[in-house]
Amino acid sequence: MTADTGFDPPHLTAVDHAIGAAIAARKLPGAVYHLERGAARYEQAYGRLSYDEDAAAVSTATVFDAASLSKVLVTAPAVLMLAEEGRIDLEAPITRYFAQCTGGGKDAITVRQLLTHTSGLASGLPARPAWQGKQAALALACQQVVTHPPGSFFRYSDINYILLGLLVERTADMPLDRFAQERIFAPLGMRHTGYRPLERLPAASIAPTQRGATEAAQLPTAHGDLAPGALLQGVVHDPTVRRMGGVGGSAGVFSTVGDVARFARMLLGNGALDGVRILKPDSVRLLTTVQSPSGIASLRGMGMDIDSPYAKRPRGTVYPVGSYGHTGFTGCILWIDPQSHSFYVFLSNRVYPDDRSVVLPLYTQLGTLTAQAASTALQ
């Protein structure tokens, strides 16, 4: 055993080799990984920020676009916090909060169904005709027609969490990014986490994501499309959230591996970390245990994935059903096993430079190797 980490070295070596092989195959330019069980911790950085020969090395302090991890780092816990305070009713129809969302089968959609991805809404908002701003996003969401009766069908949908993010803003009477900073990031000591990181961090500290098709130096267009030659570095990769100004319930958070690990520790602490309570234990239960309607095969909490098709790879072949977590399109994983009191975080920029790389086999390797390593941790 290594005194520095508390894990068996061969398992850590296997993790290093798996990530290193993916980098060598140009599946991703760089990544960070964190494994933890109790006092046993292992954290490592790999590769470079880009494939350029002079690119800086990734460090454990590198800030990554966390993509859909935003749903579980901010949006779902924010909704549950406001439910604790009586400002949101999880069983209420969304039309109680957004009267403009009536019609098209949406009157029956509840807040719970948005959280569990069983609303029957489509997976995302249309990009055309061009639109911009949160109010336009709300109007588009409210124009959608359900494809299945609410509560009868699972479909992972960004629209669900766009609406939830706007619900947080409406009921808390403050922007989502401010709520996240004041109620989640600052209390948890997540000092490097937030939306629109260029407002507080140098671009060089942030892993780039996608580059436009030509080398002409331009900026992302206002309506969310990536302009030719534009490099997204500190600007959210998700085009819908770019149209919303960089802050949305579905994406937009940038973070470091250490900060995401603090969030995971809070959940394993039943909603509290270092003497600071973020969520009540019952809210942690709602977030992390099965809350899907009966008859739905894809099992979700009110935020976390448990046993949907998206869960199988990051869970790997060893962690049991009942472990939970989430992934992000940019190449990110948070996976937690309450049974062994262990978790891992993986952040990468696999979408650099052209959004074509597939790293799903690596997810399975990491989930499996992590569980094997966690089983050897010092007690």
Image (spheres, rainbow, N blue to C red):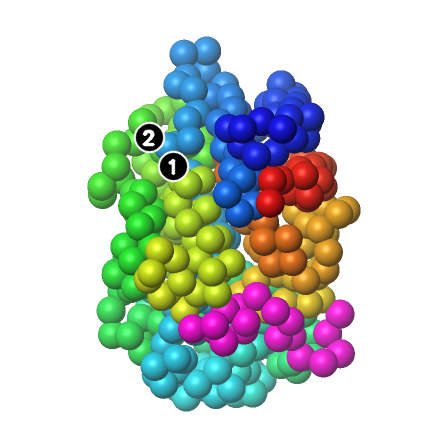
Percent of width and height locating residue 224: 40, 48
User: Mark 2 or mark 1, which is nearer the start of the sequence?
Assistant: 1
Q: In which quarter of the image is residue 204?
A: top left
Q: Residue 257 carries which label?
A: none
Percent of width and height locating residue 217: 33, 26
Q: What stretch is highlighted in magenta?
A: 280-297
Q: Residue 63 carries which label?
A: 1
Q: Quadrant of residue 305?
A: bottom right
Could you classify mark 2 by the number of other residues whose Cα lies within 10 Å: few (under 14), some (14-19), or many (20 or more)? Answer: some
Residue occupying the point 57% across, 66% down: 288
Residue 51 in the figure: left or right of residue 99:
right
Residue occupying the point 48% across, 53% down: 264
Nearest the eye: 345 or 38 = 38
User: Disc 2 marks which amino acid?
Assistant: Ser
Q: Where, quadrant-wise, is the N terminus in this rendering? A: top right
Q: Which residue is the site of mark 2?
A: 205
Rounded to the nearest angstrom, the CA distance separating label 1 from label 2 is 6 Å
